[in-house]
Amino acid sequence: MRLVSLLPSATEIVAALELTPFLVGRSHECDYPPEVKTLPVCTRARLDTQQSSLAIDRAVQDLLRSALGIYDLELATLQALKPTHIITQDQCDVCAVTFAEVQGAIARLFEPPPQLISLQPHCLEDVWQDIRRVGLALGISPDPLLNSLHTRIHACQAWVSDRPRRQVATIEWIDPLMASGNWVPELIALAGGENVLGTAGKHSPYIEWSTLLAIDPEVIIVMPCGFDLERSRQELDQALHTYPQWQQLRALQTGQLYIVDGNAYFNRPGPRLVDSLEILVEILHPPQEPKFQGMGWQPYSPFPKDGTPSQL
């Protein structure tokens, strides 16, 4: 069995099913578990991800209007790997190589073709079904993994069951503003929060500043798609200089604005969504010894250019 994973969440599913030794290729974004970073890379981005949030959003929209994908396949690499299985997705054209492009490449490059496993997660149940689909397709029972994940979910629910629900807005992109959709509203509910933006099972929507200011949520959690903690902090620092509306939000004024590592956790519909749930619990209803603080999340305190704390 020779597996190629074209998206990070699929790589993490394969690893959680203890099938990492069968991986022979990955996407350029697959970086967990760390040992997969030595594998050949089968995709590349068509845009510069080091640009600002606003520039990235404009580049993405330009590519989509031109009917171009955001990513390319490294066809020679893919063909040389001779995969028996390729795992891809048909959920979001901005998240990974498009399903149609993968189908076309398989038809051109391989005879007989490898088995194509396509994931389509929109909500938590879809994620669990994708894990089941991958496991069964690769000859591994997914039940031990799924049982372990659900045990952790039930522990989170028990922890928050008698605690007051907190009003929460999650931001998936900083400039322009986007709220989090798909599985994130479900995670907020499981963590003892009341989701106020975005809809479970639906794509993440753009939102207007007037909407966020009108709601003025108790807690705001910023989780830009594809950004780690440091990059999220940099983008939010810049946004506070560009958009003074941030200073009007009570979450910033009361120390209830947080940044999380969206790239490693919330944006990847795989096993680490349960880690994401545990991060939300730590933020909303903190245990005595948080596991992920500083690594997966941190409170956001704005600093002006001279490096001293802002006086809000």
Image (cartoon, rainbow, N blue to C red):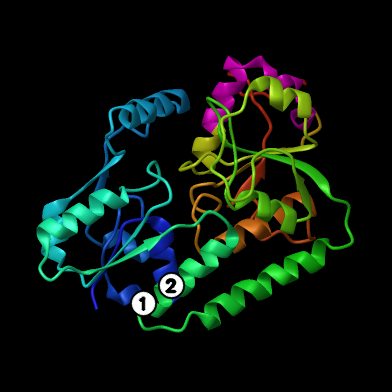
x 31%, y 48%: residue: 98
Residue type at numbered disc 2? Arg
| Marks 1,2: beta carbons within 8 A | yes
Above or below — where is 146 with respect to 126? Answer: below
Crowding near the residue tagged with mark 2, few <14, some 14–19, many ≥20 C-alpha atoms within 10 Å: some
Q: Secondary structure at mark 1?
A: helix
Residue 4 drawn at (x, y percent): 27, 64
Mark carried by residue 137: 1
Q: Is residue 294 visible?
A: no
Q: Which residues are magenta?
A: 234-252
Q: Secondary structure at mark 2?
A: helix
Residue 90 drawn at (x, y percent): 38, 53
In the image, taking residue 127 as reference, residue 59 lies left or right, namely: left
Q: Disc 2 marks which residue?
A: 133
Above or below — where is 232 with respect to 127? Answer: above
In the image, taking residue 195 as reference, residue 177 lies left or right, namely: left
Q: Quadrant of the C terminus?
A: top right
Above or below — where is 184 with respect to 287? Answer: above
Image quadrant where residue 199 sits? top right
Q: Is residue 178 visible?
A: yes
Image quadrant where residue 197 sits? top right
CA gap, disc 1 and disc 2: 6 Å
x 77%, y 29%: residue: 215
Residue 216 drawn at (x, y percent): 78, 29
x 15%, y 65%: residue: 81
